[in-house]
């Protein structure tokens, strides 16, 4: 005899995007798990788009003959996107988003001094005390606090 799923038992989200114990429903949303595929693609492709500037600059530096800067940029983009893939929220549905976004954000922020290294401090306006230096001093704390302020206690399972 087939028994219905136990309503008191919490649903378990598998890493392949399926949900057991809820009849195929996402826990707490009433939506089928298949509809979350767009959210998964949004996470992966959105972060990929965020890292495109590092990848593009790395290719520019390689074409200009700056091998150390270009190769380190490729490595930075690969490490950053590796952190994105490793920190997929559906793999850890109870983990807060800001924790999952911490390493990808740090890797992306590391791209700023990397780009300054590649172009030189004069090109970034850092030696003359121009707008580049003010932006570099003010933007880092604001961007780092973004994930905590925007997502706070949000989790994959709660959405």
Image (cartoon, rainbow, N blue to C red):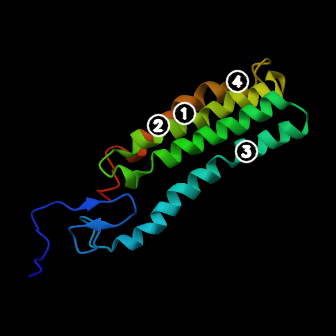
Q: Position of residue 80 (x, y in %)?
A: 59, 40
How far is mark 3 from mark 1, CA to CA? Answer: 16 Å
- Of the two numbered discs 4 and 3 on the same chain, state the one appearing first in sequence: 3
Q: Position of residue 10 (x, y in %)?
A: 17, 60
Q: Which residue is mark 4?
A: 133
Task: Identify the mark at residue 55; answer none if there is no mark.
Answer: 3
Q: Secondary structure at mark 3?
A: helix
- Of the two numbered discs 3 and 1 on the same chain, state the one appearing first in sequence: 3
Residue, far bottom: 1
Identified at 46% across, 63% down, the residue is: 39
How far is mark 2 from mark 1, CA to CA? Answer: 6 Å
- Of the two numbered discs 1 and 4 on the same chain, state the one appearing first in sequence: 1
Q: Which residue is mark 2?
A: 102
Of badges 2 and 4, the one in the foreground is 2
Tell me if mark 4 has few (under 14), some (14-19) or many (20+) residues whose alpha carbon lies within 10 angstroms of its own: some
Q: Quadrant of the N terminus?
A: bottom left
CB within 8 Å, label 2 to label 1:
yes
Q: Quadrant of residue 67?
A: top right
Tell me if mark 1 has few (under 14), some (14-19) or many (20+) residues whose alpha carbon lies within 10 angstroms of its own: some
How far is mark 1 from mark 4, CA to CA? Answer: 19 Å
């Amino acid at each position: 005899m087939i028994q219905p799923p136990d309503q008191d038992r919490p649903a378990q989200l598998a890493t392949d995007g399926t949900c057991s114990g809820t009849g195929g429903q996402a826990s707490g949303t009433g939506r089928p798990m298949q509809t979350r595929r767009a959210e998964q693609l949004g996470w992966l492709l959105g972060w990929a788009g965020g890292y495109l500037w590092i990848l593009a600059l790395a290719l520019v530096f390689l074409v200009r003959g700056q091998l150390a800067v270009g190769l380190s940029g490729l490595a930075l983009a690969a490490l950053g996107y590796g952190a994105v893939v490793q920190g997929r929220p559906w793999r850890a549905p109870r983990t807060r988003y800001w924790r999952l976004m911490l390493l990808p954000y740090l890797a992306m922020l590391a791209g700023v001094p990397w780009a300054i290294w590649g172009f030189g401090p004069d090109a970034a306006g850092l030696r003359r005390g121009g707008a580049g230096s003010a932006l570099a001093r003010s933007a880092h704390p604001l961007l780092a606090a973004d994930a905590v302020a925007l997502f706070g206690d949000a989790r994959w399972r709660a959405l």
